[in-house]
Image (cartoon, rainbow, N blue to C red):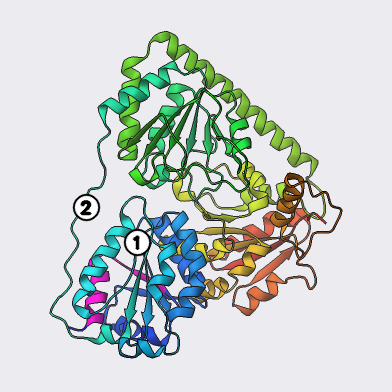
Amino acid sequence: MRGREVFMQNLVAHGVRHIFGNPGTTENPLLDSLADYPSIDYVVHLHEGIAVGAASYYARATGLTGVVSLHAAPGLGNGIGMIYNALRANAPMVVTAGQQDTRMLRREPLLAHDLAAMAAPVTKWSTQVQCADEIDEVMRRAFKIANDPPCGPVFVSLPVDVMEQQTDNGPIAPGRLYREAAPDARALADACAMIKAAHTPVIVVGDEVARTGAIADLVRIAERIGAPVWLESLRGHVSFPGSHPHARASVPVDADKIRQTFANADLVLLVGGAFFEEHWFSPGSPFPKGARIVQIESSAQSLAYKHAVDLGIVAGMGAALRALDDTIVAEVDDAWRAAAKQRCTRLAAQKAQDKAACQARLEKAWARVPISISRAMNDVRKATPANALIVEEVITAKIDFEAAFQIDAPDQYLGGRGGGIGQALAGAIGASIGYPGRPILCVSGDGSAMYSITALWTAAHYNLPIVFVILANREYRVLKHNLDIYRQRFNTQSSKPYPQMDLAKPALGFVEMAAGAGVPGVRVSQPDEIAGAVEQAFEAGAPRLVEIAIESMR
């Protein structure tokens, strides 16, 4: 059989149902094979970055491996930013790109480059298939590495002549790989001893808890020890219920402020994440002096990687948390339980105070025009169906978003990792493909939306039930915030304006852009119009856009 047949049959054997891509000439072997494999749908995008972003969110939404087909060197280059985001999000993906005929690569033909070298810095593994005989071996290894904890993208370069070569090495179906290790009993005993000795424990949780289905196990631990639960500064999933009395906010993005956040803690339990993703330099440790640090991870690679810990455990996340809880139950006495219960009571009171403060801020800004962010988030949430999956990229509106959308279930939310903007519109496509027919709310800032605006065409092309809510403040607001912080941190006091950070001249017309891509839209400028516009958009059961003019920093 030909190499391209081995490639396609390998996708079928691995359960692939969708290829996200942007077609090009060097991908003709794949494109010409699609008709022979009706179980695989090709989801077409107008830009390679959108294809990668969609595949990443598809993988994260479903737990399946996202497969992407990019076009040669320029196409791979267009997708690299989103591949980086997928790497930081631990999205299992196999990214491919068509390569020119190997018989003329030394002559540096059009579109050719060392694709494996281009992709290597942003993938777990990057390679080029040298002959058809190794296609099956390469693809089996690619799927395995993509799904080994911590998950992430891999890259495979597919030369057009290799895809047409004959081979006797047909595809071999993958076996079942059981990757979860049992927790070490000695480690559990040591962790329990540290927890028993703690008077003010805190928990910081990452995306791995949601990915491994261990949320209920973490909730049980938090309630057992009476600990507040903080989130990573950037989160891609809901790993702890937002409405739970122990749920706190995202941790800050510099070591000094993280240390202040945990100032009273004598034990910090890190569970399933990249601790920490800092944005500004501050000297010293992010942990308060004297606090004991315990970390639980699914992968040894993540354990004690950035900061020293007193105790680290590598095991299946749910199994480790359940076993730790069982150990605590067996070891603690009534006095310890009473102290933990008092901590729980204080956390519930703090949660109520926080909710009241958010309500007060909302009421103060209720009728303001331009529309306040808090009012916009409140009314969008009220108009969003309970079964909707929310794809969010609001950045500077994050506090108000989290106050309005206290999301409890992991299948209700997807957020961006990596820090590169433009993920939400692309990600909403992948989320919708992963959950056919389910309503999707995609909420994005206007600056972020412009990075991936062509995703609207794909939504219209496949008639996906996505409501795109664009918060239009006509500026790169996060950059203005960061410039203020920079000036303060580096003592560069300035009354200068914000350079190149406004998007008002000319004003971006998202309703008009959406119409050009086949998506009907409406522009909202008055607070009382928000809920009705969003409700009508969802009622359509098809792609719709709502542009909300919100307050700016100008």
Give the main secondary structure, helix, strand or loop, of the magenta stretch.
helix
Whole-percent x and y of residue 257? 63, 36
Question: Viewer-proximal residue, 85 or 365?
Answer: 85
Disc 1 from disc 2: Cα separation: 14 Å
Identify the residue under disc 2.
177
Residue 520 vs 23, above or below: the answer is above
Identify the residue at image location x=28%, y=87%: 161
Whole-percent x and y of residue 49? 51, 71
Identify the residue at image location x=55%, y=76%: 457
Q: Secondary structure at mark 2?
A: loop
Whole-percent x and y of residue 472? 72, 61
Question: Which region is colored magenta?
Answer: 3-20
Residue 111 vs 190, above or below: the answer is below
Q: Are marks 1 and 2 in contact (CB under 8 Å)?
A: no
Density class for disc 1 (Cα within 10 Å; few <14, some 14-19, many ≥20) is many
Name the quarter where the C terminus is drawn.
Answer: bottom right
Question: Viewer-proximal residue, 380 or 40?
Answer: 40
Three-letter code, disc 2? Leu
Three-letter code, disc 1? Thr
Identify the residue under disc 1.
65
Whole-percent x and y of residue 31? 35, 83
